[in-house]
Amino acid sequence: MKKKNKEDLYKENKLEASKLRIAIVSSDKCKPKKCHLECKKNCPIVKTGKFCIEVDHASKIAYISETLCIGCGICVKKCPFTSISIINLPKDINKDVVHRYGPNTFKLHRLPIPKLGQILGLVGTNGIGKSTALKILSSKLKPNLGKFNNPPEWRDILSFFRGNELQIFFTKLLEEKLSPIIKPQNLNTIIYMCRHDLSILDYLSDYVCCLWGKAGAYGVVTCPFSVREGINIFLDGFVPTDNLRIREESLNFKLATDQDATDEDKKRLHFYNYPTMVKTLNSFSLTIDKGHFSESEIFVLLGQNGSGKSTFIRLFAGLIKPDNLESLSFLESLSVSYKPQQIQAKFTGTVRQLLMSKLKGLYNDPYFNNEIIKPLKIESILDNQVLTLSGGELQKVAIIVTLAKNTNIYLIDEPSAYLDSEQRIIVSKIIKRFILNTNKTAFIVEHDFIMATYLADHVIVFDGQAGVNTVANTPQTLAAGMNKFLKIIDVTFRRDPTNYRPRINKYDSVKDKEQKLNGTYFIIDE
């Protein structure tokens, strides 16, 4: 092994000195009374006599000194409850700390910059600091600049933001000259919008701030970008102003077309026909026109609320019976896996126990782990009780359980519900790849338009009077189906030339009028 010279050691020490360490200890997972204090016993700094980790069996939670910590990661590996995270950051970012909730807890770096008369959009994952930033900007939370033991006065806070637009903003907020309430017609009001549906965020925002970091540990707010640039930066996964990659790979929304599958591919697939079906529920009536589907394809159901999309899914799942009983034999012949719109946690036990009971051999299957489980990043909740999971966590577990069933048809009702924009991207890619590689069929209800267009091979459009009498039309190609649906709601979409993501045209804009005149409400190629 090559021995390091003094110059190499000097460079390493200099690089190490330039790093800022954040130690996060989960108050939910850390249980000193139930462990052998492995973190403290194995810490090399504690062995030298320094108090890097302070904890005993009477403690409620372990305390880690970020100043003394050398970032060896031994405590992270030794903790039996996986309650510790040690994160290295550039040291110069420490001067931008706006708020920290306490020792070894989440901290926020920088704040979005509000502008009068404009809508600010925030893009980032769950647990990255969007709500904290909004609480500070709406005066519901006083920023402590990271000094949680000795919170600063407003005089010091204003001095911290000296020379920044935020100094003027907070001054006006304190003088009650600003009212941060969603009220579009008032030009003296600032509007903040935090949405996970990127197409809606794109349409409503005047400018965007992205947030990057590690969920539950730290969040960093970028400088303001134009809406198109900001969302594209988030999707690309690289922040040029911080010279940092926040995601391993970018997402491209190049959409499916009929030419994507060769004639040889189509010959190998099995095609199925389904009959016309009618279902009446109280005063609501749904008619499903006959159609067909094949393997390795995803059918996205599009329609307004109350148009019968979930009823369609429940019919195919066999949960309800059609009025015309002659179609019952077809439905009974289907082998399906169903994920409902509303997920109810009923399992008594941990996530790990649930997955082991439902997945059986697939739980340790390398392919299923690499393609489905690992991308969803559920390692941190495996030992959590299912009954205590949040909506987003429950959604990810439900998707895993649904895809684990060995069936021919997957019926998935709103897979994006409770998920943030990045998790929606991950789920879209997982489902798309899974259906294609396993030669299965999926029928999906989805309201996130970007996610719907990314997933869809074919579209089933629901029209008629919502809640009264609707029709599920025969499956159409992506372009034809999207055009039909968008014409119903009188909205046009264009494509971003960089990553092909669909973008809503401003109502009555030149582009909007031009596309409506040509009858192209949805453009596949530009």
Image: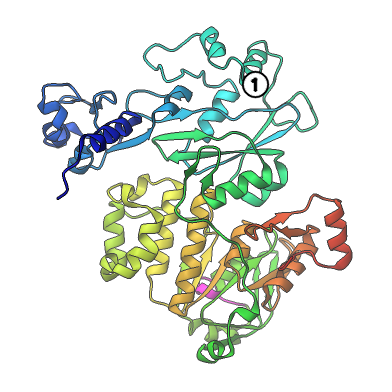
The amino acid type found where label 1 is placed reads: Glu
Q: Does the magenta stretch include residue 154?
A: no
| Magenta stretch, residue numbers | 316-322
Question: Is 391 placed left or right of 19 in the picture?
Answer: right
Q: In this view, does 200 lie above or below 169?
A: below
Q: Is residue 76 above or below residue 44?
A: below
Q: Which of 11 and 472 is in front in this view?
A: 11
Q: Which residue is pictured at 81% across the width and 58% down the height? A: 490
- The mark total stands at 1
- Secondary structure, mark 1, is helix
Q: What is the x, y in percent for residue 383?
A: 27, 48
Q: What is the x, y in percent for residue 423?
A: 48, 52
Q: Quadrant of residue 79?
A: top left
Q: Does the magenta stretch include residue 318?
A: yes
Q: Is residue 507 above or below residue 205?
A: below
Q: In which quarter of the image is residue 78?
A: top left
Name the residue that disc number 1 marks: 165
Residue 339: tell me if it is visible: no
Q: What is the x, y in percent for residue 378?
A: 35, 52
Q: Which residue is pictured at 64% across the width and 58% down the height? A: 501
Disc 1 packing (10 Å; few <14; some 14–19; many ≥20): few
Q: What is the x, y in percent for residue 364?
A: 26, 66
Q: Which residue is pictured at 67% across the width and 59% down the height? A: 306
Q: Which residue is pictured at 33% across the width and 48% down the height? A: 381
Quadrant (top left/top right/bottom left/bottom right) for the C terminus: bottom right
Q: In this view, does 195 lie above or below 488?
A: above
Residue 155: tell me if it is visible: yes
Question: Is 451 placed left or right of 384 in the picture?
Answer: right
Magenta span: chief secondary structure: loop
